[in-house]
Image: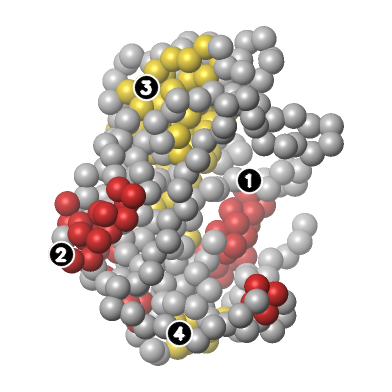
Amino acid sequence: MPVAAGVGPHPQLPPPNPTLIPTVNIAQAVGWPANRKPLAGPGMAVNAFAGGLDHPRWLTVLPNGDVLVAETNAPSRPKDAEGIRGWFMKRVMNKAGAGVPSANRITLLRDADGDGVAETRSVFIEGLNSPFGMALIGNDFYVANSDAVVRFPYTEGEIRIAQPGTKVLDLPAGPINHHWTKNLIASRDEARLYVTVGSNSNAAENGIDQEVGRAAIWEVDPKRGSYRIYASGLRNPNGLAWEPGSGLPDFGTRRQLLRLALQLLWSASGRTGAASAARPGRQGQGAGLCNRAAHRFARPGLFQERSMAGAIRQRSFHWSARFMES
């Protein structure tokens, strides 16, 4: 079937091809060849800012221009590699280059002369636990480890934090920890943190008890160490950001976060989602936002979804993903 047949408003899909072992093709990672670099658009240039990093997964730019990079990989997950499925998954991860221990550090890169190349490189924080998300609020630097949000004291311009961190609150982890990367951003008034927690499975195949607090965005009070489920039904909602330019207060920022979360929502027409089980027993949490959050910002509509763990019952909700424009 030609590639053109699979695109457009009425794509044609090849028939299913059931096999005993699924086909998994992994692209081989290739670095920049010597003395070569990607071609940039007119009026732009590309160069290597830094190299030789160990699984750089997330970046944060501090107000003074320092670039922080989380060098991280998956934590130990003994139950995620059990049985035949786990054996194959481990081989695939090794082939992809992901089967190595995590560096567990955040590295600072500084380009003082502005030439696009970091001439200063320092271990900013080490001894973390598969860190990912980072956020600075005043003199408090927050890191989302795979199992907790941790706070460190920060002084502008320093290239290393040697003081131990203080745990703000625990995050869902455990021996499976399927989606282990936890992203976080600060609210615009810097009073709250929003932390992403991915599902512990693809379709709750590890049991609904393993999904408590997962597939969700947490709203965290960093001073009290408390949280609430802000939005749920989000399989692995990484990459949070505020919509630029609106300058809206609390209501607006909440709406923007919800809009972004909906873009990451598992489609109800696709596979069954693994939602947060923060409110077990409530149906219709599998691929939607929690009622408490969604009812505040959504217009009446019709949203049909599948419930948790492959259940075939469908329910119609009188809310949709249409938001009022400011």
The residue that label 2 is drawn on is 83
Question: Which residue is at a point 32% across and 30% down the rendered structure image?
Answer: 103
**Residue 184 in sight from this viewpoint:** no
Give the residue number, with chain letter if any, for mark 4.
16
Please tell me whether mark 2 or mark 3 is closer to you in this view.
Answer: 2
State the mark number for residue 242. Answer: 1
* Residue contact between numbered discs 2 and 3, judged by CB atoms under 8 Å: no
Closer mark to the observer between disc 4 and disc 2? 4
Q: Secondary structure at mark 1?
A: loop
Q: Residue 261: x and y, percent?
A: 55, 59
| Of marks 4 and 3, the one in the foreground | 4
Q: Is residue 22 left or right of residue 114?
A: left
| Sooner in the amino-acid sequence: mark 1 or mark 2 | 2
- Residue 244 rendering spot, x and y as whole percentages: 71, 44
Label 4 to label 1: alpha-carbon separation: 40 Å
Q: Quadrant of residue 163?
A: top left
Q: Of callouts 4 and 2, which one flags the residue occurring earlier in the amino acid sequence?
A: 4
As rendered, which of 132 and 156 lies closer to the eye? Answer: 132
